């Protein structure tokens, strides 16, 4: 059976494996609303189909399958839709977050081949996988503060569960990590050589198993036989003690102050990055990660749905459309490409608690929240 669309290839192999291929290589497989809808429809159908034993997902690069996984959501669409008041923007985030929840709660093996770029929305469709495969080409990040947004798609949930204060560090800086760091931080399970991925994709279609549990065990045996490196030394990957301590501070100004008083190159570079991000959203993101640490995934996604509404329609600051941090951040990075966002307020020290707190007030009563059905 086939559910192919131009940007999402979907088929079930003879042995009952649902095979998904993101096919938008020129955009690094950035997720559009039609792609989100296609993935949700297919995964729901396969979840309920007893003939499907497992699901595997990959991206397409410029040279063919693999090479890139997914660079995130389609930020040019976000920009245009926000300026035009297009209601599809609201639909995108509601449906994307529901898709993230579907993947995290999927009852069958879900194997994500996270080769190349894995950022933003790409993390949302892979972090919930039962097996997360990275390669020497993996470039993983949640870089949303760079565009005046926050690490969504469940980012609060999975980043806050990284060891120590790595979650705060990755969320605030948007730092790009490779395979070894991803495993050390609990954001990947197995490192495979990129050249082995086509063979693995074929092997998935040759496993005969009577049920999803047996399939998962057989796939694990295959990976063990392939001798993929599932144990990566963490020593070189974890944050230095000084940077770790800084990101444990209670506020963004306190984090900055701690970095300023740390005479290391790593602290200086981190501070330089923070000074380029949206000051307002740095404060929001720190609060997001700290709150999410005490939440289950459904509650985190509901909070993030509230946050993203406020990012595009920040009524308490009398800002929306072109005046929002997010639209300005996307303009500077991807539209005008001047890389000079005009953040408001312009300095970390100018952000007040009164600016941050309303982001966490839901625009909807609980009974009509767009993600009320998530459990």
Image (cartoon, rainbow, N blue to C red):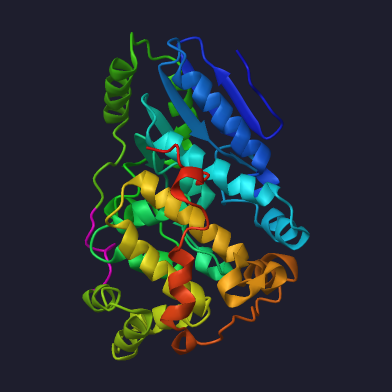
Q: Is residue 46 left or right of residue 166?
A: right
User: What count of labels does the image hold?
Assistant: 0
Residue 132: percent from left, percent from top: 38, 39
Residue 34 x, y percent position in the rendering: 67, 37
- Magenta stretch containing residue 173, yes or no? no
Residue 236, magenta (yes or no)? yes
Identify the main secondary structure in magenta: loop
Which quadrant of the figure has residue 48? top left
Decide if residue 61 is in sight here: yes
Q: Is residue 211 left or right of residue 82?
A: left
Compared with 118, 214 (above or below) is above
Instruction: Name which residue lies at 24% across and 79% down.
Output: 242
Q: Residue at (62%, 63%) from the top-left corner?
A: 312
Residue 68 at least partly seen: no
List x then y, in percent, for residue 92: 62, 46
Residue span colored magenta? 233-240
Q: Position of residue 270 (x, y in %)?
A: 40, 78
Q: Where does the C terminus fall, quadrant-wise?
A: top left
Q: In the rendered view, would you say 54 is above or below 59?
A: above
**Residue found 38% across the figure and 51% down from its top:** 179
Q: Quadrant of the N terminus?
A: top right
* Residue depicted at x 43% and y 72%: 357
Quadrant in the rendering for residue 230: top left
Report whether 224 appears left or right of 62: left
Between 356 and 141, which is closer to the camera in this rendering? 356
């Amino acid at each position: 059976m086939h559910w192919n669309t131009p940007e999402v290839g979907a088929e079930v192999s003879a042995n009952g494996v649902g095979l998904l291929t993101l096919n938008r290589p020129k955009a690094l497989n950035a997720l559009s609303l039609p792609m989100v809808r296609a993935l949700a429809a297919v995964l729901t159908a396969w979840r309920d189909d007893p003939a499907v034993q497992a699901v595997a997902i990959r991206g397409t690069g410029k040279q063919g399958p693999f090479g890139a996984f997914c660079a995130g959501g389609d930020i040019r669409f976000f920009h245009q839709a926000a300026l035009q008041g297009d209601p599809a923007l609201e639909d995108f985030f509601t449906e994307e977050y529901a898709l993230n929840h579907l993947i995290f709660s999927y009852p069958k093996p879900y194997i994500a081949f996270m080769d190349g770029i894995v950022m933003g929305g790409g993390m949302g469709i892979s972090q919930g996988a039962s097996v997360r495969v990275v390669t020497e080409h993996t470039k993983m990040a949640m870089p949303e503060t760079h565009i005046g947004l926050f690490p969504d798609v469940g980012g609060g949930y999975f980043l806050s569960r990284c060891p120590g204060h790595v979650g705060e560090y990755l969320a605030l800086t948007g730092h790009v990590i490779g395979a070894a760091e991803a495993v050390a931080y609990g954001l990947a399970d197995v490192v495979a050589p990129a050249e082995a991925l086509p063979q693995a994709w074929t092997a998935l279609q040759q496993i005969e198993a009577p049920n999803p549990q047996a399939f998962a065990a057989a796939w694990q045996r295959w990976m063990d036989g392939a001798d993929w490196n599932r144990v990566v030394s963490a020593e070189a990957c974890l944050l230095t003690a000084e940077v770790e301590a800084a990101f444990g501070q209670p506020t963004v100004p306190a984090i900055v102050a701690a970095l300023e008083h740390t005479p290391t190159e790593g602290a200086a570079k981190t501070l330089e990055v923070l000074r380029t991000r949206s000051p307002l959203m740095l404060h929001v993101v720190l609060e997001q990660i700290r709150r999410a640490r005490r939440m289950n995934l459904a509650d985190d996604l509901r909070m993030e749905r509230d946050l993203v509404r406020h990012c595009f329609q920040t009524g308490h600051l009398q800002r929306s459309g072109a005046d929002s941090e997010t639209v300005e951040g996307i303009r500077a990075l991807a539209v005008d490409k001047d890389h000079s966002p005009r953040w408001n307020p312009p300095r970390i020290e100018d952000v007040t608690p009164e600016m941050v707190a309303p982001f966490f007030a839901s625009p909807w009563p609980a009974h009509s929240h767009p993600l009320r059905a998530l459990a």
